[in-house]
Image (spheres, rainbow, N blue to C red):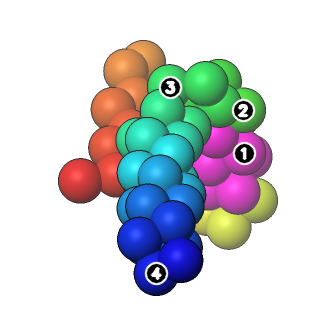
Amino acid sequence: MVKKILKGLGIFILIFIIALAVAPFIFKDKIKALVLKSINENVDAKVAFEEVDLSLF
C-alpha cells in the first residue's frame, strides 16, 4: 500500500516538474506580450525588444 502511494506521488511530482519546464516554451508569445504591455504601462517610454529567453532553471 505504501509503495503504491509513493509511486503515485513520484509520478505526480515528475509530471509536475516536466510541465513547469515545458510551460515557458508553450506560452512564450503570451508571456512576451504581457511583459511588454506591463513595461510600457509603467515607464514613460516605449520599450521594444527582439529576443526573449525564458527559463525555469
Q: Nearer the viewer, residue 56 or 42?
A: 56
Q: Position of residue 40 (x, y in %)?
A: 68, 51
Look at the picture and state if 29 lies above or below 39: above
Q: Which residue is mark 1?
A: 34
Kind of residue indicated by mark 2: Lys
For the residues carrying marks 4 and 3, which lies nearer the camera in this image? 4
Kind of residue indicated by mark 1: Leu
Which of the two discs, 2 and 4, labels the residue nearer the N terminus? Answer: 4
36 vs 16, left or right, is right
Q: Are marks 2 and 1 in contact (CB under 8 Å)?
A: yes
Q: Which residue is mark 4?
A: 2
For the image, the number of numbered tags is 4
The residue range painted magenta reads: 31-39
Query: Element type at marker 1?
Result: helix
Mark pair 2, 3: CA separation: 10 Å
Q: Position of residue 50 (x, y in %)?
A: 42, 18
Q: Position of residue 32 (x, y in %)?
A: 60, 35
Q: Which residue is mark 2?
A: 30
